């Protein structure tokens, strides 16, 4: 098992500081949150991209994924989503990221054919560029398609080696899907596991791993020996959450014990 840390839990920190924290506490990779105000953002210049890639290399940290906010099932014109996908795929490639994280964002009650069709069409169209760049696109179990069943349905229709899944354990749990059912739904669409912990469905404030109710041990069961697990600590949405840095060492140890 290989461990990655999402920089979502370290909002506004310089990239070098986030990488040092990861390395010092036993995390081998990072999910790079790609958003305005962060050290990695969509408007990075070519020089800034080279500098970021050099920092990753210097700290010997794997850029597991560029965590974008592209919504592949969202209503609207395909051309705008295609342009976003292409831009973020090139940024991911410049940083050496293995994956580009995307969301469904199909809208409320959008687990139907229309939202699926938009996602399938757009992912299939971008798959060739992803393949050429050596980056894979990962559709996360989230928002309108929070279950493994829903994401697996889309990815089966896409049917391309450069498109896989991120299993966000919180969202599949909120969808009422068992870890075994999620694992079966996503088995043909390899990607990586994204972990977190919370007190319950009515309180999603992030907690230290193992301090909440999510079935982390069951989600880790069957993970390949070289599989990636990423901790996404959703600090920006929950100002009352404890600071992440003191939790990093215990979190890594907890995951290794579960595995």
Image (cartoon, rainbow, N blue to C red):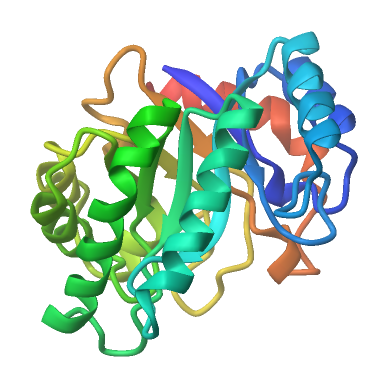
Counting from the top left corner in percent of width and height, residue 137 is at: 38, 43
In this rendered view, identify the residue nearer to me: 219 or 40: 40
Q: Is residue 70 above or below residue 116?
A: above
Report whether residue 240 is seen.
yes
- Please tell me in which quadrant of the rendered image residue 62 appears: top right
- Please tell me in which quadrant of the rendered image residue 133 appears: top left
In this rendered view, identify the residue nearer to me: 205 or 141: 141
Q: Is residue 249 above or below residue 235?
A: above
Q: Is residue 173 above or below residue 98?
A: below
At x 39% / y 85%, what residue is drawn? Answer: 76
- Rendered-image quadrant of the N terminus: top left
Left or right side of 114 for 141: right
Please identify the residue farthest to the bottom as the structure is shown: 108
Counting from the top left corner in percent of width and height, residue 6 is at: 63, 41
Report whether residue 215 is seen.
no
- Rendered-image quadrant of the C terminus: top left
Left or right side of 185 for 198: right
Q: How many numbered marks are there?
A: 0
């Amino acid at each position: 098992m290989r461990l990655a840390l999402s920089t979502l839990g370290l909002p506004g920190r310089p990239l070098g500081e986030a990488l040092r924290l990861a390395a010092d506490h036993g995390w081998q990779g990072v999910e790079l949150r790609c958003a305005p105000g962060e050290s990695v953002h969509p408007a990075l210049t070519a020089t800034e991209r080279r500098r970021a890639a050099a920092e990753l290399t210097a700290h010997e940290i794997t850029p597991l994924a560029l965590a974008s906010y592209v919504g592949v099932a969202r209503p609207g014109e395909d051309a705008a989503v295609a342009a976003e996908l292409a831009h973020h795929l090139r940024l991911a490639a410049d940083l050496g990221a293995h994956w580009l994280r995307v969301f469904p964002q199909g809208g409320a009650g959008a687990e139907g054919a229309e939202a699926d069709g938009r996602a399938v069409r757009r992912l299939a169209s971008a798959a060739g560029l992803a393949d050429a760049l050596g980056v894979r696109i990962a559709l996360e179990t989230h928002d309108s398609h929070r279950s493994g069943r829903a994401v697996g349905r889309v990815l089966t229709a896409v049917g391309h080696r450069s498109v896989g899944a991120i299993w966000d354990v919180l969202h599949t749990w909120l969808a009422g899907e068992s870890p075994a059912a999620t694992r079966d739904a996503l088995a043909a669409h390899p990607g990586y596991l994204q972990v977190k912990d919370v007190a319950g469905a009515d309180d999603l404030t992030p907690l230290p791993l193992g301090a909440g109710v999510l079935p982390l041990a069951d989600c880790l069961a069957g993970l390949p020996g070289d599989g990636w697990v990423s901790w996404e600590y959703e600090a920006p949405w929950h100002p009352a959450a404890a600071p992440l840095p003191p939790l990093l060492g215990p979190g890594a140890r907890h995951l290794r014990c579960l595995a």
